[in-house]
Image (cartoon, grey):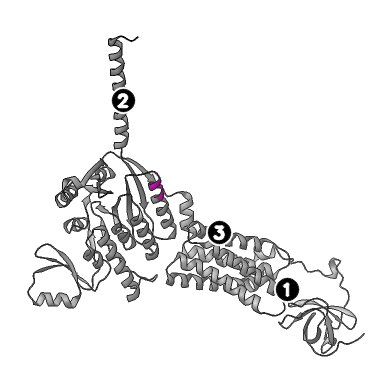
């Protein structure tokens, strides 16, 4: 039996171990984890995929907050919209750290975050949509971006009037005598002015609003200034309000406690000294961003289609075909990795090529199979461009592919044969009798004009006919002619014999 002294000692040891374990568990629970997602490139489908993956990674790791390190001149509005949706869909508190500039699409993404913190000397704004030529977009596009940024700012608790002034230069942004900041249409502004209302004009009509760090803090659009991640983390605490976790500064927490009551704002942990995990842009991400750019995509597709076209026109399968397939694979593969459903477009393209092959090698003439093949091929290509870029960019890229491919076809048949590189693939030596070559003898091809023969092989356009008991290699005038069809010789150029389909009976030997 244990003595009372030993029993007491065991109890104290158990209590001590339990307290130590509870302390370690509590300490582990208090350690904050923050994921950092860099936004350093122009906004496009490639960077969109990287950001979406970064958010998913933070959610999987049960991070306490996500900091978006923003330094971008902007980019595509449609990609920015998808990024904004992903940010607003996550349950993890989000902070936009404007680490120099958040312009255009970068400002839209920052506004989608719960909090906005800016580095000294930073800028945010100028979010009006523009075309690829830098011209102002039409009213339809402007209206879409204006409503998107306005509703997003209102939902995230940012001043929607300031957000609208960043998009629409037809608004006048003013600060009233009571400190409120509002945006007015020019006619309403003039009415207010005539009524004698005191207003300080922040952004006049015809100007797009861009705020410096000092201005954003003065107008309450940014929630703080930080010149390092350590400063930013030290500013924030994680609290829970109505079951939703938020990242707030001490000042914002005090305001929430005053509005909702201290018991409604539950402190969870501080972000000061938090462990950070940075989602780096990998080599694969950079490759996808490069391959999905409009210029590179158009070039890859043009080279791919040119290679296939040359291969179809030539016997066998060689270098042009392999290069063409490689370029097409890179084009569709790169866009598949950017998660825009390019696999279905690739399938449509392959089916289209198959139908074109059937039309060329199996079926006579040009009919349903050929037309369907062209529709599937170009439909698949345009689907990729439309999914990856804005409509105007998609049309420009699609047109570029057609032009570049046409130029390539012309060069392949009229310019390349004259180059030194082409001569490595072509036989340039003249096969004369001096070096031992002897022809089958001279033949008077001109005597064939007007004669009727029968096609032995399909003529598309080259093939063989039976003429006066002889096998003669011929070319059609352009039309496909099936085998066992009467043909008439219509022209002779040297040893080239041109024929067309005929309804007359063949000449007999």
Mark positioned earlier in the residue sequence (2 or 1): 2
Instruction: Find residue 19 and report its horizontal and vertical position in percent.
Output: 28, 26
Q: Residue at x 25, y 64 (%)?
A: 163
Q: Which residue is mark 3?
A: 330
Q: Which residue is mark 2?
A: 18
The span shown in magenta is 56-62
Q: Secondary structure at mark 1?
A: loop
Q: Is residue 137 left or right of residue 419?
A: left
Q: Which residue is mark 1?
A: 362
Q: Residue at x 16, y 57 (%)?
A: 218
Q: Secondary structure at mark 3?
A: helix
The span from disc 1 to disc 3 (Cα, nearest Å) is 30 Å
- Is 13 magenta? The answer is no
In the rendered image, which quarter contains the N terminus?
top left
The span from disc 2 to disc 3 (Cα, nearest Å) is 59 Å
Dot 1 crowding, Cα within 10 Å, few <14, some 14–19, many 20+ = few
């Amino acid at each position: 039996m244990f003595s009372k002294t030993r029993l007491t000692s065991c109890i104290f040891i158990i209590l001590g171990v339990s307290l130590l374990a509870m302390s370690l568990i509590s300490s582990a629970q208090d350690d904050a984890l923050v994921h950092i997602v860099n936004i350093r490139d122009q906004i496009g489908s490639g960077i969109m995929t990287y950001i979406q993956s970064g958010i998913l990674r933070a959610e999987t790791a049960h991070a306490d907050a996500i900091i978006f390190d923003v330094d971008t001149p902007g980019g595509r509005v449609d990609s920015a919209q998808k990024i904004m949706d992903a940010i607003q869909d996550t349950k993890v508190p989000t902070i936009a750290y404007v680490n120099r500039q958040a312009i255009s699409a970068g400002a839209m993404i920052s506004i989608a975050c719960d909090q906005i913190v800016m580095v000294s000397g930073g800028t945010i704004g100028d979010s009006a949509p523009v075309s690829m030529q830098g011209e102002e977009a039409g009213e339809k596009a402007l209206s879409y971006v204006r409503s998107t940024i306005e509703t997003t700012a209102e939902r995230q608790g940012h001043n929607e009037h300031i957000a609208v002034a960043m998009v629409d230069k037809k608004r006048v942004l003013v600060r009233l005598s009571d400190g409120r900041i509002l945006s007015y249409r020019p006619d309403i502004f003039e009415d207010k002015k005539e009524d004698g209302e005191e207003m300080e004009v922040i952004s006049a009509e015809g100007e797009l609003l861009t705020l410096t760090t000092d201005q954003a803090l003065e107008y309450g659009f940014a929630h703080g200034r930080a010149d390092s991640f350590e400063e930013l983390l030290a500013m924030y605490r994680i609290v829970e309000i109505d079951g939703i976790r938020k990242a707030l500064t001490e000042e914002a927490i005090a305001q929430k406690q005053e509005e909702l009551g201290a018991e409604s704002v539950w402190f969870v942990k501080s972000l000061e000294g938090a462990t950070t995990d940075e989602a780096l842009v990998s080599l694969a991400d950079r490759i996808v961003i490069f391959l999905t750019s409009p210029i590179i995509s158009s070039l890859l597709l043009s080279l791919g289609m040119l290679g296939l076209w040359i291969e179809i026109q030539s016997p066998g399968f060689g270098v042009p075909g392999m290069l063409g397939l490689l370029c097409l694979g890179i084009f569709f593969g790169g866009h598949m990795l950017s998660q825009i459903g390019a696999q279905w477009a690739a399938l449509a393209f392959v089916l289209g090529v198959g139908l074109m092959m059937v039309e060329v090698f199996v079926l006579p003439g040009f009919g349903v199979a050929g037309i369907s093949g062209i529709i599937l091929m170009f439909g698949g290509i345009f689907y990729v461009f439309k999914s990856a870029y804005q409509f105007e960019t998609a049309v420009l890229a699609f047109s570029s592919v057609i032009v570049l491919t046409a130029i390539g076809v012309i060069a392949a048949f009229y310019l390349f044969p004259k180059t030194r590189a082409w001569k490595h693939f072509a036989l340039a030596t003249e096969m004369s009798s001096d070096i031992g070559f002897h022809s089958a003898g001279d033949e008077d091809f001109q005597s064939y004009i007007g004669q009727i023969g029968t096609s032995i092989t399909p003529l598309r356009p080259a093939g063989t006919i039976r003429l006066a008991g002889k096998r003669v290699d011929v070319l059609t005038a352009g039309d496909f002619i099936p085998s066992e069809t009467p043909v008439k010789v219509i022209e002779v150029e040297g040893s080239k014999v041109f024929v067309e389909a005929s309804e007359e009976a063949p000449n007999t030997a």
